[in-house]
Image: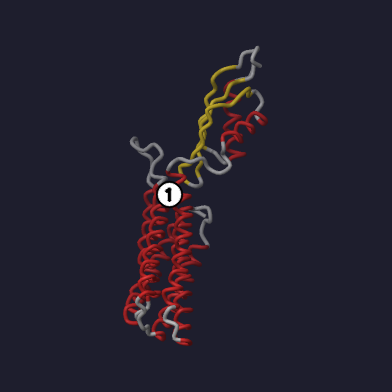
């Protein structure tokens, strides 16, 4: 899946969620349902987050320049991190409103709430299907998908709350189910913010730990006496970067070893962008 495909999917999902958001706001105000208002607020942040994800793709596509040797590749990671933080804040807001509603319950128009929630579920299923068909490894798309998944679950919670209100008159179901949706949104937000934040602070990508790289290269590349000063990080979730120093075994050809190490890093670790410095031969006594 290409970035262009992901960008197109994000735009379509934004149009769907943004278009229905206004209907859900009106339905929530008229019916008095917190679940609908929470879902509408979620849709509002989702629309903004989807547009932010789209902007991240657009900026990431810009070429490198003298002031940015890696270009704007990390913009989509920054967009994903922002979306994760927004999910966390949204979850906290929903919990706050739900607690207030539990303390001061109010009547709700169950029929209107149910009708709007069902329409919202249909829209969210469509948006989720659009995003779910994209690249699963794209962190930016995953952030957008979590937002829409939260919307979908919010619609399900609103439907259940409306059914309980109409069936048993349990108005308390509205804030209680809203808290459940908030918990799921919080879970997704923490995961996305954690994964994106790990990239932004240049944390070591999974599978690229220094001891593992050292052991693999020494065992796989002839002419390598030792490997040191290994640093691994990622520009994006799919573009790992590695730098390291190699000490040659006696008689080894520096250029041949350097090329072999770079090929091994690309083949075994997916690190197609690697800087390998050859610092000379190990002394015969040390060998």
Q: Which residue, as the protein is rendered here, is positioned at the far front?
A: 103
The residue under the point 44% across, 76% down is 158
Q: Residue 201 appears at what percent x and percent y?
A: 43, 42
Q: Residue 209 location, x and y as percent?
A: 57, 37
Q: Is residue 24 visible?
A: yes
130 to 208, vertically: above or below: below
Q: Is residue 283 above or below residue 123?
A: above
Say whether residue 9 is visible.
Answer: no
- Which corner quadrant holds the C terminus? top right
SS at circle 1: helix
Q: Residue at x 36, y 38 (%)?
A: 68
Foreground residue among 161 and 50: 161
Residue 106, position in %: x, y?
Answer: 35, 81
Quadrant of residue 272 within the rendered picture: top right
Residue 40 position in % (x across, y down): 37, 71
Name which residue lies at 42% across and 45% down. 73
Position above or below: 12 against 216: below
With respect to residue 177, does 209 lie above or below?
Answer: above
Say which residue label 1 marks.
Answer: 77
């Amino acid at each position: 899946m290409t970035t262009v495909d992901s960008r197109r999917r994000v735009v379509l999902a934004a149009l769907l969620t943004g278009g229905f958001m206004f209907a859900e706001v009106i339905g929530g105000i008229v019916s008095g349902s917190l679940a609908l208002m929470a879902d509408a607020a979620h849709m509002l942040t989702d629309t903004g987050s989807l547009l932010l994800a789209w902007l991240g793709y657009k900026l990431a596509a810009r070429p490198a320049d003298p002031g940015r040797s890696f270009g704007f590749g990390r913009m989509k990671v920054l967009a994903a991190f922002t979306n994760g933080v927004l999910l966390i804040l949204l979850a906290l807001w929903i919990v706050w409103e739900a607690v207030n509603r539990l303390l001061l319950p109010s009547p709700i128009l169950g029929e209107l709430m149910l009708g709007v929630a069902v329409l919202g579920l249909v829209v969210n299923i469509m948006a989720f299907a659009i995003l779910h068909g994209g690249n699963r490894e794209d962190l930016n798309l995953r952030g957008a998908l979590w937002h829409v998944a939260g919307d979908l679950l919010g619609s399900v919670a609103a439907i259940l709350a409306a059914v309980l209100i109409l069936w048993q008159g349990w108005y308390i179901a509205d804030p209680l189910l809203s808290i459940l949706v908030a918990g799921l949104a919080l879970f997704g937000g923490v995961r996305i913010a954690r994964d994106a934040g790990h990239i932004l602070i240049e944390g070591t990508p999974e599978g690229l730990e220094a001891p593992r790289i050292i052991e693999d290269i020494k065992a796989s590349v002839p002419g390598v006496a030792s490997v040191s000063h290994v640093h691994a990080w990622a520009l994006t979730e799919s573009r790992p970067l590695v730098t390291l120093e190699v000490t040659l075994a006696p008689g080894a050809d520096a250029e041949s070893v350097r090329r072999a190490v770079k090929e091994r890093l690309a083949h075994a670790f997916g690190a197609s962008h690697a800087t390998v410095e050859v610092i000379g031969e190990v002394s015969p006594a040390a060998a």
